[in-house]
Amino acid sequence: MLRSSLSLSTSDIMIESTHFSASYVGLVVLVLILLYHVYQDKSRRSAEIGNLPGPQSPSWLRGNFLQVFNSEAWGYHEFLAKEYGSMVRLHGPAGSKTLYTFDPKAMHNVLVKDQEVFEENDGFIQSNLLMWGDGLLGTLGHRHRKQRKMLNPVFSAAHMRGMIPSFFDVTHKLENALTMKLKSGSDIQEIDILSWMGRTALELIGQAGLGYSFDPLVGEESAHPYSNIIKQLVYVLNALYYDILVADDNIHASRPALMRVQFWRTNLLPRVCNIGTARFRRFVVNLLPWKDLHDLRDMADYMYETATGIYESKKQAFEEGDERVTQQIGGGKDLISILMKENMKATEEDRLEDSEVISQMKLSPLTLFCYTQLRLNWCKYLDFCGNGYNFGQFSAMARILHLLSRHPEVQDKLRDELIQARQKNGGQDLSYDDLVSLPYLDAICRETLRLYSPVPIVARIARKEAVIPLSKPVLGLDGTEMHQVAVPKGTNVIVSIFNSNRNTDLWGKDANEWKPERWLSPLPNSVIDARIPGVYSHLMTFIGGGRSCIGFKFSQLEMKVVMSILVEKFRFSPSAQDAATFWQMNGITAPVVGEDKHPQLPIRMSLAK
């Protein structure tokens, strides 16, 4: 009986063991099948990108990086669109996968519909967090949306109306300074208009944005050290992140430095930022023998101290009452005062912390100053390994004046419009509604921002696998039509604002010509039907989605106020060096003259009457 029981137990064990082995084998087979499908899916996604048309890579290490990013890259971007269309495969550094697109549906998918899938990379977020704090540029997801929710109403048309007096006050100071300069010398003088536009832009954001004055706009030099810090910061950042590529020989010479910077920022910075305490990291920075880094540290410290001082002063004024607030510059109608008022009324859930408000204050002078002078718009310019630090952008105001100097018939027509508008208003400065309704001034601003978008490209990185649909099928290398592209996690996606705004399929054969008159008639149906996902006038200049340029209305008003005063008062003509003037694309994207690579824009000026 015992032997029988033992025999049955052994038999049962053998059966159980057989079942376990079969189950184990089945599980292993199932896992292998799943892994195979995952591998196949990844291979298919990679194969889809590989099937897209695109240029060859000159180097595995660098990919097409230095073809896309150098001071004369405009022609290469035109080549990509003409040769390969609106969805292009590029080679990123070290073989990384990269897409380049200006397809309307693809842009909408990346920037709007799936914006939480396609975000800035960790290097971009961490570097902005270190430099500016936990403001818009250093946050993602819920925290970023919370800040946008609080900030969006600050830039409403109603608040813009309240800033008009400050805008005109600053611009008249500029007018007086330039008039005195012309009267003290010859009737016609060459003036570096880029420098004056930069000073004006900083003072405008100082008064209208922060309720603070940085520059009295008298004499050649600005008074407040903050203004010099802002200007120096642009060049230090450029040295840190781009090493200023200015000519073919220099491009080759600077490639090792450029790639080291990209490696540091993209691969090391997100990890280093999490090591130890902030005090320990500051200690390490102090030890590093890198002058530009130390300069950047000192500038960040100074901007933080200045922003904190302004914030505490405003906070005290609010505690003392409305009368004290109205006594400040801007009469309490500046952007930060409005933000602080709204923040005090917000619920606990929506309220921003003091550090978040101070971060916006640190950002405001730089972003809006650069948006209009060097157009350092935080719509961001790509650093190939994910939305990087090319802050240098065109001077929107200086660009308009440069174009008007080359097109005297347009300048005269605009001047006539401005003179007539002022006469109708009894010789007084125009109201907000009258100013924004001037058709020819508006057409000139729109056309300039279309053809010469201050930010040529922006980029995102796919945080997970996704599919990007296309509005126009692409013929793959294997001859098949591709209506969508499967994108693996980690793929860089470059959105070409430059080529979207110049797309001949939408804007017509004259898309590459500066024609303000195109905005005086209804736009082509092709433009309307394309549903460009930009926040401004069927253009991608200010991009779209949750990370679009939050201050574009401020910038528009600033341009129109400055143009309305300067064009009526002065006449602009090309300088003797105009033929040698070139607008660089990389690094500090700004005008240079001849071999002198310092940003400048000399224009001949005289009194118009």
Image: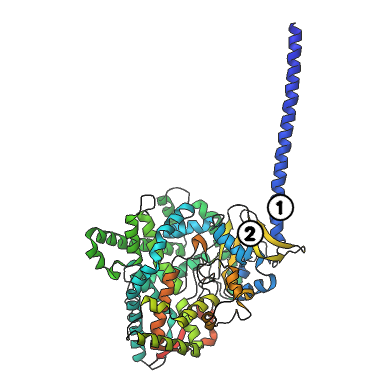
Residue linked to disc 2: 468
Callout 1 crowding tier (Cα within 10 Å): few <14, some 14–19, many ≥20: few
Residue plotted at (58% across, 58% down): 461
Q: Is residue 109 left or right of residue 199?
A: right
Query: Disc 1 versus disc 2: distance between alpha carbons?
Result: 17 Å
Specify whether residue 405 is in view.
yes
Residue linked to disc 1: 43
Residue plotted at (42% across, 62% down): 152
Residue 170 against residue 154 in the figure, above or below: below
- Quarter of the picture containing the C terminus is bottom left
Quarter-wise, where is residue 301 in the image? bottom left
Q: Is residue 503 left or right of residue 448?
A: right
Quarter-wise, where is residue 337 in the image? bottom left
Which kind of residue does numbered mark 2 sit on?
Ile
Which kind of residue does numbered mark 1 sit on?
Ser
Say which element carries label 2: strand
Percent x, y for residue 231? 42, 71
Residue plotted at (46% across, 56% down): 145
Say which element carries label 1: helix
